[in-house]
Amino acid sequence: MGRTTALLAVVIVVTSVGAGLVGADVAGEGPGAPEGGSAAQYDHVGQFFRGVTAGAVPGSSVQPATDGARIERRSTRSVGADSDGGGDEVRVGVIGSAFGDAADIDGRVVARERVTASRFGLAVGKRGAGGHDAAVASVVAQRAPASSLYLASVGHEPTPAEYARAVDWLVEHDVDVIVDSGSYYPRTADGMDRIAAAAERAADEGTVFVTSGGNTAKRHWRGAATDPGWLAFGDDGTQGNRLGDGRISGAVTLRLYWTGSGDYDLYLYRDVTDGPDEVVAKSTRESGSAEAIDAVLPRGSYYVAVDVRDAGAGHVDLFAARHRLAYAAGGGGAVAPATAEGVISVGAVGPDGRLAAYSSPSTDVRAAGTVALPDGRTLEGTSAAAPAVAGVVAEMSVAAGEGGLTPAEAERLLRRTAVDGRIYPGSAVAAAGARSRAGDDETPDDGSGVKRGP
């Protein structure tokens, strides 16, 4: 790489190599492409399970639901068919690619819906029954014992319309809280807007929507272009952004989104030692503010380049959903639904309480990025932090009494009782109960018995 002039001289040819390209030319507009393009879901990339001894997680801000403040169980809604024969449970909807069977949630599931015709879900890191999405539901079940679950499966690559149907199904079932541990990378800016709009509609209906902020800190670059030509990613003027640590192979997912009236083209190059670097994929849309490349590549060294046709105004965001970028900085780093208004986005902290290296810094709140599961494994990443927060919100809704909490109230209480953005479940639940006793929509002032932090 590292050759500015060579990038300008290379002949632009799309080459099919190895397993070939997957929709790498005109994003979302090829024959048979669904309206709005596919909203490729790579929420599990970087998420994995580990065999550990079950129990409280060292350094975790999320403790087992039996710890901390004891609260009186009061009904927010009656579901009529809960696990213990009663009707006083808070309803939590979980969106995921696919849900298997898991003993620790089967008795808690009231309804399931699959909005996609595909039977295949993303199973990276899957071990045994349930997989990633069942683990997400399990975290909610642990954190909020008085909750019933509604599971909406959207498949591996849902369209924006399918995603919206999943959200609408949950809202129609009158859930109190929705949690989605996914990060979605649609091929068009319109697709991103439609996913965000679905989450915003749910929040407008009064459902608290909690989502992972994404593990994008090392896979996202944000910057701005000033002049036409190849975009410089570093202060040293380097015009290529290398993928991965060394040689890579397999699936590559790249997305370029921008604000303003600019015009950009996205290229994927193979670094060749004995000749001109090869263009192995390109995306050169004639309209819209997004470019997309999905490719399957043989083993080699690759980098991304962006051709600035019109710099316009505003910033540019480059995402590599599956690989690290050599140049990854600039803040931000969230994709839908975390970008939606009224949605609570969740980042992850490590055992030391600091923001995890993989976590996007631009989230509303943070929680532990490692949560123990009943079967002895752990769920890690923002995929673990989001359902932990959703479970806390469910407990807060119960503590708040009749009517529960509005999305704005839930976020305000979480933020008020957090320390450096990190939530503390006992404090948040106590604050919700105090709000109920105060008989208004505001958290009582300091000195009312509501503590901040641990």
Image (tube, rainbow, N blue to C red):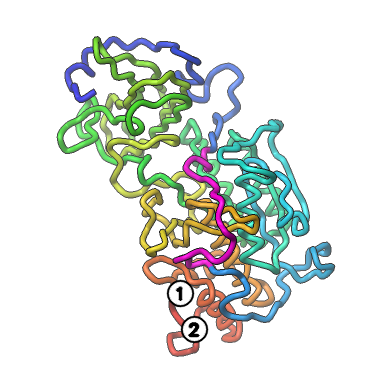
User: Residue 250: percent from the left, percent from the top?
Assistant: 47, 25
**Residue 50 colored in magenta in the image:** yes
Q: Residues in magenta?
A: 42-62
Is 340 placed above or below 68 here? above
Which image quadrant for residue 236? top left
What numbered label is drawn on residue 450?
2
Q: Which mark sits nearer the N-terminus, 1 or 2? A: 1
Q: Is residue 314 visible?
A: no
Q: Residues within 10 Å of mark 1 (few under 14, many from 20)?
A: many
Give the CA distance from mark 1 to mark 2: 8 Å
- Residue at image point 48% right, 17% down: 21
Q: Which residue occupies the foreground of this view, 412 or 120?
A: 120
Q: Which amino acid type is marked by label 2?
A: Val
User: Residue 354: percent from the left, percent from the top?
Assistant: 36, 61
Q: Which residue occupies the foreground of this view, 38 or 392?
A: 392
**102 left or right, relative to 225:** right
User: Magenta stretch: dominant SS?
Assistant: loop
Residues at discs 1 and 2 in contact (Cβ within 8 Å):
yes
What numbered label is drawn on residue 279?
none
User: Residue 224: percent from the left, percent from the top?
Assistant: 25, 38
Is 67 placed above or below 349 here? below
Q: Which residue is mark 1?
A: 417
**Residue 428 colored in magenta in the image:** no
- Residue at image point 38% right, 33% down: 256
Q: Which residue occupies the foreground of this view, 104 or 395?
A: 104
Q: Is residue 113 visible?
A: yes
**320 left or right, relative to 115:** left
- Residue at image point 47% right, 21% down: 296
